[in-house]
Image: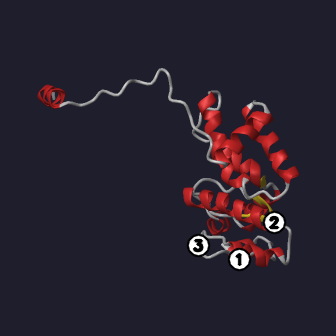
């Protein structure tokens, strides 16, 4: 993948071992830059690695964006199939790191429902705990609040409760009651099957 980026004209490119970008690697990179682009594979493992990498970079003080690779593809594959220009074009339009995390959190979640919005907020808390700057954190909270169409102060209060372990969810009122499985009921169910 590093060679593919080099072929696409990226002169300064490094790769972590596998998908594990470490705090130590970020500290070394910080000596040379305060910004970066993450270009992990477009599969599930790569997306997860990109999200984790964003948190590690945020913690280390490197502002990162993500290169949007199509599902299942990797940089070497893109260069091999479509040529270096195709990968270079992807570098022109990276996705803001926090926007990437929010969009990933929203995948498969119905954000028109309160429970879906809550899921998204829970998903972003680990990243937000790595944010050192209050100004950045506030901007991120406003971004997620806008994406979920909720009040930023509500998002902030939920984040604080989740982070502090004080967040407990009340059981749903309409949740079905649990039926204790007695020996008689078990026998009736077994016979009915």
Q: Whole-percent x and y of residue 148? A: 72, 34
Which residue corresponds to mark 2?
A: 62
Q: Please indicate whether residue 16 sits to the left or right of residue 174 in the image.
A: right
Helix, strand or loop at disc 2? Answer: loop
Q: Give the CA separation, mark 3 to mark 2.
A: 20 Å
Q: Residue at x 61, y 34 (%)?
A: 116
Check disc 1: other Cα within 10 Å, few if <14, some if 14-19, many if 20+: few
Q: Secondary structure at mark 3?
A: loop
Q: Quadrant of residue 44?
A: bottom right
Lower sequence index among marks 1 and 3:
3
Please tell me which residue lies in front, 121 or 63: 121
Residue at image location 63% in from the left, 36% down from the top:
118
Name the image quarter holding residue 191: top left
The residue labelled by disc 3 is: 18
First in residue order: circle 1 vs circle 2:
1
Q: Is residue 145 left or right of residue 110?
A: right
Residue 147, given in percent of the width and then of the height, sits at: 75, 36
Q: Residue at x 65, y 34 (%)?
A: 117
User: Label for residue 24?
Assistant: 1
Please state, as top left, top right, bottom left or bottom right, where the N terminus lies in the image: bottom right
């Amino acid at each position: 993948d590093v060679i593919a980026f080099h072929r696409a004209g990226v002169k300064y490119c490094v790769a972590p071992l596998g998908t594990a970008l470490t705090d130590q690697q970020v500290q070394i990179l910080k000596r040379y830059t305060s910004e970066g682009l993450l270009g992990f594979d477009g599969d599930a493992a790569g997306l997860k690695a990109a999200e984790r990498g964003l948190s590690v970079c945020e913690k280390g003080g490197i502002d990162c964006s993500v290169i949007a690779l199509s599902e299942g593809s990797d940089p070497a594959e893109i260069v091999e199939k479509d040529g270096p220009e195709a990968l270079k074009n992807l570098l022109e339009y990276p996705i803001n790191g926090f926007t990437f995390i929010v969009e990933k959190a929203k995948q498969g979640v119905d954000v028109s429902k309160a429970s879906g919005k809550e899921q998204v907020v829970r998903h972003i808390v680990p990243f937000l705990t790595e944010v050192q700057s209050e100004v950045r954190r506030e901007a991120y909270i406003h971004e997620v609040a806008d994406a979920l169409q909720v009040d930023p102060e509500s998002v902030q209060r939920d984040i604080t409760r989740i982070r502090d372990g004080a967040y407990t969810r009340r059981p749903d009122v309409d949740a079905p009651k649990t039926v204790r499985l007695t020996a008689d009921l078990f026998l009736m169910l077994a016979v009915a099957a």
